[in-house]
Amino acid sequence: MSDKAILTIDGKQYEFPVIVGTEGEYGIDISKLRALTGHITLDPGYVNTGSCKSDITFIDGEKGILRYRGIPLEQFANGPNFIEVSWLLIFGRPPTTEEYREFAEELTHEANIDEGMKHHFNSFPRKAPPMAILGSMVNALSCFHPEFLDLDDEEKFYAAAARLISKIRTLAAFAYRHANGLPYLYPNPSLKYVPNFLHMMFSMPYHHYECDDLTRDALNMIFILHADHEQNCSTSTVRMVGSSQANLFASCSAGINALWGPLHGGANVAVMEMLDRIHKGNVSAEEYVKLAKKKDSGVKLMGFGHRVYKNFDPRAKLLGEIAEKLLPKMGRKDPLLDIARRLEELCLKDDYFVERKLYPNVDFYSGILLRAIGIPTNMFTVIFAIGRMPGWIAHWWEQKHMEGAQINRPRQIYTGNGLTDYVPMPGRKYPKRG
Ligand code: SDX
């Protein structure tokens, strides 16, 4: 493969360097395109555009490969917990035993939130969407921890990262408690990351919620599988906001808001609503698939398809396997799992989905598992955000320290009015809007 790309415009040839990634991906470096040719590129949705070089996560969408700092996702299935994987993503290698112990201790120590933050929860309406609360409260950390607004050294970054990963659990649990009119339960320093989160979610002052090993391992795995996914919409948002040198809390709050969308992290809620509709008999699996294939139906098969994976999303595979194993062990049978399997079976044999390479993605099975653990549907995307936090933090730091770091500011092709004069109000006559 040549190390140059040639572009010919009006008979004149321009050369651009071709860069090659670790796994042989090719990129044409067009950073000099406009200066040399007066042209920009146009790529709505950035389907063909790389925003950066990154060392954090590698995805091969054709082969269904996902690696965190080079380690294949499958190797996390029976090994490390979410905290160890968070350390790996943020600091670039697995922690030593001592580093792991210190980090875990820091998370335990920093699990609580400032008492002043509790009053904010009480001011939200009971019906406030938990993702709205989470995005607001992560941003509010900028008010309660001003010492972390300017992360100019590794030690402060380490401390801020630990606070965010630890406190997002507490903020999420408090959002749930507030929405359900329940008293806030403080983090319990004798509990590990996942059991402490579930304790804050489900314990009562008179009854301690015991997190069994099955539930602990399932939620650990769910967090691990969501921990990073290179330049997805929410992570690119964190990098975009961080490129203006906005602080870590503000940038991750922006990521939470991008994740909320039903085409992105909000899909896990939409999948359960879809499966529920089919279960309640409003529509059969076959009819739903037919609807999803019709352009004008406005219906998509939620949890299916992916911008990068044109093969199975390895996370969907692992989550489906965990659900098959876990539900019977928990003595639970969820008819939605059977419906999900039925939909998968129908689509894998249907030309519409096969031709467009639409396979189950991470959101297709995650909701069934979360429901088995007792997490309510409106908290599913919140769980995604807790899992994705280490990825956002890692990318924010990488953006801040990347070679030639500058504010991200895409160009556009203007297609609006040509030069237009201002007409004073009385003289205006326009057709009715809409
Ligand atoms: C996540 O980017 C990431 O990494 C995201 C994520 C992460 O970890 O951060 O992996 C998490 O967001 C997973 C995706 C969750 N979203 C959903 O499950 C929503 C349903 N999926 C679709 O909305 C869609 O597949 C996207 C948004 C995920 C991907 O959309 P693309 O890449 O822009 O693809 P497209 O919309 O251009 O679709 C190509 C074709 C179109 O048909 P044609 O115009 O070619 O006829 O496939 C069709 C689409 O209509 N299509 C679907 C479909 N997804 C795509 N048709 C029916 N059902 C679907 N789900």
Image (cartoon, helix red, strand yellow):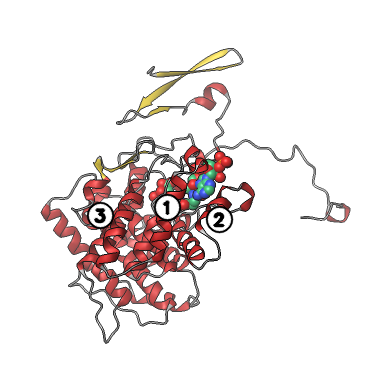
Question: Do we see residue 236 in this rendering?
Answer: no
Q: Nearer the viewer, residue 179 or 211?
A: 211
As drawn, 60 above or below 85: above
Q: Nearer the viewer, mark 3 or mark 2?
A: 2
Label 3 packing within 10 angstroms: few (<14), some (14-19), many (20+) = some
Q: Earlier in the sequence, mark 3 or mark 2?
A: 3
Quadrant that contains the C terminus: bottom right
Tell me residue 354's x, y (percent). 47, 40
Q: Residue 287: which numbered mark, if any?
A: 2
State left or right for residue 327 relative to residue 277: left
Label 1 packing within 10 angstroms: few (<14), some (14-19), many (20+) = some
Q: Amino acid at mark 3?
A: Tyr
How far apart marks 2 and 1 lie (CA) works out to 47 Å
Label 3–label 1 contact, CB within 8 A: no
How far apart marks 3 and 2 lie (CA) works out to 51 Å
Would you name the residue on which mark 1 appears? 246
Question: Do we see residue 224 in this rendering?
Answer: yes
Tell me residue 118's x, y (percent). 38, 76
Seen at 26% across and 59% down, the residue is: 325
Q: Nearer the viewer, residue 321 or 220?
A: 321
SS assignment at label 2:
helix
Label 2 packing within 10 angstroms: few (<14), some (14-19), many (20+) = few
Q: Earlier in the sequence, mark 3 or mark 1?
A: 3
Quadrant that contains the N terminus: top left
Tell me residue 404's x, y (percent). 38, 35
Would you name the residue on which mark 3 appears? 158
Q: Amino acid at mark 1?
A: Ala
